[in-house]
């Protein structure tokens, strides 16, 4: 790849990033954090420190979401906290 092709690619990336809505990124990040937290709570992994970090990060993002998405994430947080308590107790 020549230098000019790399510059065009970088410019295209910047153009694409400008199109992304922050609210969409927050929803995507929330989904990823929830998946990671549940994964870290699974019986075969049980990484409570990392699960707690993901839950806390998700809780920090939750107030920034739109109403419909916030309600969904609040339910996910409730489920994650229950799963965390169960995993920590065993």
Image (tube, rainbow, N blue to C red):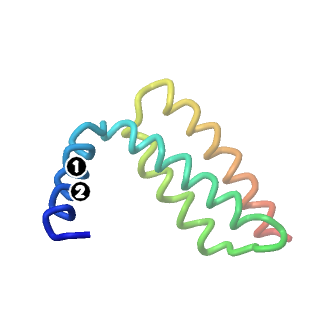
Q: Name the residue nearer the viewer: 19 or 37.
A: 19
Residue 82 location (% of width, % of height): 74, 52
For the C terminus, give its image quadrant.
bottom right
Residue 84: image location, x then y, percent: 71, 61
Q: Is residue 54 left or right of residue 4?
A: right
Label 2 secondary element = helix
* 81 over 15 or under it: above or below: below
Q: Identify the image quadrant of residue 62.
A: top left
For label 1, the residue is: 12
Name the residue: 63% across, 60% down: 37
Residue 38 in the image, given as x and y percentages of width and height: 70, 57
Of 86 and 17, nearer the camera is: 17
Q: Quadrant of residue 65?
A: top left
Dot 1 and dot 2 residues touching (CB under 8 Å): yes
User: Which residue sits at x=21%, y=42%?
Assistant: 18
Which residue is outermost to the top? Answer: 68
Measure the alpha-carbon separation of dots 1 and 2: 5 Å
Q: Which mark is residue 9?
A: 2
Q: Give the residue at x 25% y 37%.
A: 19
Q: Is residue 5 left or right of residue 23?
A: left
Q: Residues within 10 Å of mark 1 (few under 14, many from 20)?
A: few
The quadrant where residue 2 appears: bottom left
């Amino acid at each position: 790849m020549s230098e000019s092709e790399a510059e065009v690619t970088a410019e295209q990336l910047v153009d694409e990033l400008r199109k992304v809505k922050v609210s969409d990124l927050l929803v995507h990040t929330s989904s990823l954090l929830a998946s990671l937290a549940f994964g870290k709570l699974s019986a075969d992994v049980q990484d409570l420190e990392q699960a707690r970090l993901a839950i806390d990060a998700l809780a920090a993002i939750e107030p920034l979401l739109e109403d419909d998405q916030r309600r969904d994430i609040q339910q996910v947080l409730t489920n994650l906290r229950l799963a965390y308590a169960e995993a920590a107790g065993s």
